[in-house]
Amino acid sequence: MLKINLGGCNSFVNDAEYKAYLDKALAAFDVLESETGAGNDFLGWKKLPSTNLSNGLIEECEAVRDSWKAKNVDLVVTIGIGGSYLGAKCAIEALSHSFAKELGSKGAPEIVFAGHNLSEDYICELMDLIETRNVACVVISKSGTTTEPAVAFRIVKQYLENKYGKAEAAERIVAVTDAARGALKSLSTQEGYKTFVIEDNVGGRFSVLTPVGLVPICLAGYDIRALLEGAQSMEELCAKRCTECNPAIQYAAMRNLLYDGGKKTEILVSFAPKLQYLGEWWKQLYGESEGKDGKGIFPASVNFTTDLHSMGQWIQEGERTIMETTVTVENASRNMIIEADAQNLDGLNFLAGQHVEHCNKMAELGTRLAHIDGGVPQLNVTIEKINEYNLGEIFYFFEKACGVSAYMLGVNPFNQPGVEAYKKNMFALLNKPGYEDKGAALRARL
């Protein structure tokens, strides 16, 4: 079971302050649970684990997996941006062998991602790969008109139709989209694509436990039932109106207390390289949910011990406006012992007989203590090991805590009005019909 430890904040806050913020977090929790706050029409994520364990969705995902396996598909291009790819990318990176490509691992298709950038070099190199493989595609978009994934899907769709013919291409395309409207839904109906629904009441950054995340994770060969079971355990725990047992309330309370005390940046830390994309998923979840109305903790992430040799100096002695949340993995999945060496030129014989992971754990503990001494409060979230169940736990925990934390800040956790600014400028500079005047004004500034 996921655990939270806030003892690393004791020298920065006092008990009375924390108790006051627990009360504030409980009030925000009540708003979230009663569904009376801003953005309350986007709360469908709260019951996703229990709902999707019993509604046949798992079996639908597995049917696509089995169908494409029968076609010997060995590469799945997953097209989406933001919440439409980060959760799946996080889970697949965490669960995969670090050197699967180099080892030529078989058994499930390789999952690659597109539509999350507009780099011509990237899409050309993707097509270089596609041309050598047996390919299928999952396209994820509520509207079907978001520029980055729409461009990528247009190119990949044309390739599939040219290579396999329209009928076979339609069997190699799955759309995760709106139930009834939008360009992608219309195209799916027209061409006969298998579709999964993104419900209207679930925003993209809260969608990892919908088909948005579950379809690609299942296709990659991982156990989405275990993922949902882990999330369900947190759904149950984080629904409790309890400041002593609900980790989402505790985490939200402490990070807001530290924020109001001048800690304006939160760094998510892991000593497990497999969790690098947890940081990327978490940054979108919290940045897009809290960063508005001139408010919000800035979310950043690092991977230790690697980044201790690049960012470590700044974290230890730079501007004291940061806090750290470390995600600890209690148990490694593999074993490696450090052997004694007769010459001992590296001076490491004192580690002979120790597990490499023991060294990693001592590096983690030493770092957390050093950063406390350097003025950086330490929040700690612990999972047992990296597997589907524990990833489900941490996904749901961070989602529930995000809703509570954003309501504590006094913002709507579920909108993102600021992301439209760049899109309007981009459309104007691309001469999209209807944006001519804005385009002329922008070009005059350049």
Image: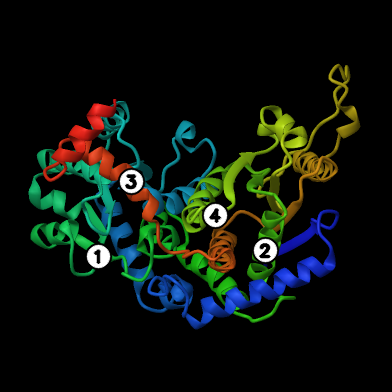
Give the distance between the C-alpha atoms of the residues marked 1 and 2, in whole angstroms.
33 Å
Check contact, mark 2 vs mark 4: CB within 8 A: no
| Vertical relation: 160 (above or below) 244 | above
Residue located farthest toward the right when viewing the structure as drawn = 350
In whole angstroms, how far apart are the C-alphas of marks 3 and 1? 24 Å
What residue would you read off at disc 4? Answer: 295
Between 440 and 327, the residue placed more toward the observer is 440
Residue 124 image point, x, y percent? 26, 28
Residue under pointer 3 = 421
Residue at figure coordinates x 36%, y 46% from the top left: 109
Q: Is residue 243 left or right of residue 169?
A: right
Q: Which amino acid type is shown beneath numbered disc 4?
A: Lys
Q: What is the x, y in percent for residue 274?
A: 58, 44
Q: How is the image coloured?
A: rainbow
Tag 2 residue = 251
Q: Give the crowd class for mark 2: few <14, some 14-19, many >=20 residues within 10 Å.
A: many
Q: Residue at x 38, y 43 (%)?
A: 110
Of the numbered discs 1 and 2, the one sitting upstream in the chain is 1
Residue 178 has which mark? 1
* Count of numbered circles in the view: 4
Mark sitting earlier along the chain (3/4): 4
Residue 74 visible in the current orientation = no
Residue 241 versus residue 296 in the image, above or below: below
